[in-house]
Amino acid sequence: MITVTLAATGGALFVARRITRWPMAALLPVVWVASEMAFNHMSALAFPWLPLGLATARTPVLAQIADLSGVHGVSFWIALTNGLVADMWLSRGDRRGNVRRGVAIAAMAVAVVAYGNWRMRT
C-alpha cells in the first residue's frame, strides 16, 4: 500500500507540473502534504508513520519547529527544501537562479536550527 501511496503522489506531482508549469519548490510541498493529509484520513491507507516530518524525530533541534506547524509543517519544510534542490537540478544552466535557491535553502536551514536551539534552551 505504501508503494501505491507514493506512486499516486508522484503521479499527482507529474500531472500538476505538466498542467501548471510551476517550479517544484511550489508544487512538491503542496502535493506531498496534501497527499499525507488525504491518506491519513483514509482508513485503509492511514499509516501513522507516513508523514515525512516524522523523519526529524531523532534530531530534536530540527523537530522543534513542529510546535509551530505540526508534523505536516515539518513535512512541508522538508518537501520545500527538496523542491528547491530539484529545481536546481532541472535548471542546471541558470547559475544565478541556482545561487538564489541555494541561499534560500541555507536560510531556511539556519532559521529552523536557530529556532530549534532557542526552543530547547527555553
Image (spheres, helix red, strand yellow):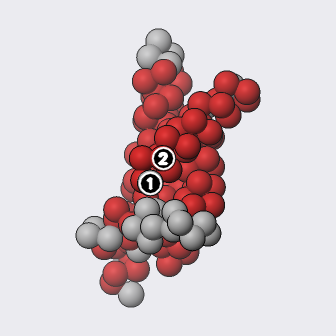
Query: What residue occupies the far right of the structure in this picture?
Result: 20
One can see residue 29 in this view: no
Residue indicated by mark 1: 1
- Say which residue appears at 39% left-offset and 67% top-offset: 49
Q: Is residue 116 above or below residue 89?
A: below
Q: Could you say where residue 15 lies in the image, as x and y percent from the top left?
A: 66, 31
Q: Nearer the viewer, residue 29 or 122?
A: 29
Res 25 → quadrant: top right
Q: Nearer the viewer, residue 33 or 117?
A: 33
Q: Residues within 10 Å of mark 2 (few under 14, many from 20)?
A: few
Q: Nearer the viewer, residue 24 or 44?
A: 44
- Say which residue appears at 48% left-offset and 47% top-offset: 4
Amino acid marked by disc 1: Met
Q: Is residue 80 left or right of residue 61?
A: right
Q: Which mark is residue 4?
A: 2
Q: Is residue 33 above or below residue 23?
A: below
Q: Nearer the viewer, residue 101 or 58?
A: 58
Q: Quadrant of the C terminus?
A: bottom left
One can see residue 54 in this view: yes
Query: What residue occupies the far left of the structure in this picture?
Result: 58
Amino acid marked by disc 2: Val
Res 118 → quadrant: bottom left
Q: Secondary structure at mark 1?
A: loop
- Say which residue appears at 50% left-offset and 19% top-offset: 91
